[in-house]
Image (cartoon, rainbow, N blue to C red):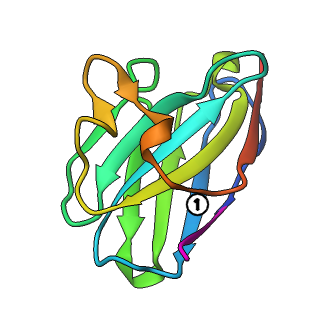
Amino acid sequence: QVQLVESGGGSVQAGGSLRLSCAVSGYTSSTYCMAWFRQAPGKEREGVAVMYTGGSSANYGASVKGRFTISQDNAKNTLYLQMNSLEPEDTAMYYCAADAGLCYARHWTLDSGGFPAAFPYWGQGTQVTVSS
């Protein structure tokens, strides 16, 4: 059973930075499609970034492109989300998600972003609050 544990959330002022971590254990596949999603109160879960652990390319949601960076450390079995130039609109619960194998259109498209239903494995979330 794959387990995902997020950490690194907190409160920061607008313009600041945070780095979220997602520790992965219980691998059942050699590679995964992994993503960060976020959900603000009263809003739908939104795809933030996605990457395939067997490669290096990534895709980002339009609202975070150029400010956020998704990365991985295979030696530490950890996925990261570096968030710079944070804005109050970035305030949300942030979730790490995974699915075994390649990333497909059912996971993410350039037009629509991420699809939460395509990811069977989820962490418990970490809260990010950005004040103006």
Q: Is residue 111 visible?
A: yes
Q: Residues within 10 Å of mark 1 (few under 14, many from 20)?
A: many
As rendered, which of 11 and 70 lies closer to the eye?
70
Vertical arrangement, residue 103 with respect to residue 31, above or below: above
Task: Give the magenta part as a residue range.
Answer: 1-5
Q: Is residue 65 visible?
A: no
Vertical arrangement, residue 84 with respect to residue 120, above or below: above
Instruction: Check if residue 32 falls in the magenta segment.
Output: no
Q: Which residue is mark 1?
A: 21
Quadrant containing the C terminus is: top right
Instruction: Say how many tags the image has.
Output: 1
The secondary structure that most of the magenta stretch takes on is strand
Image coordinates for residue 109, horizontal then vertical, percent: 27, 28
113 with respect to 23 (left or right): left
Image coordinates for residue 76, horizontal then vertical, percent: 47, 81
Residue at x 62% of width, y 46% of height: 95
Residue at x 54% of width, y 38% of height: 37
Residue at x 71% of width, y 49% of height: 125
Vertical arrangement, residue 76 with respect to residue 65, above or below: below
As rendered, which of 24 and 71 lies closer to the eye?
24
Vertical arrangement, residue 103 with respect to residue 13, above or below: below
Residue at x 62% of width, y 26% of height: 15
Image coordinates for residue 69, horizontal then vertical, percent: 40, 43
Callout 1 secondary element: strand
111 with respect to 19 (left or right): left
Q: Amino acid at mark 1?
A: Ser
As rendered, which of 30 and 54 lies closer to the eye?
30
Q: Quadrant of residue 33?
A: bottom left
Quadrant containing the N terminus is: bottom right
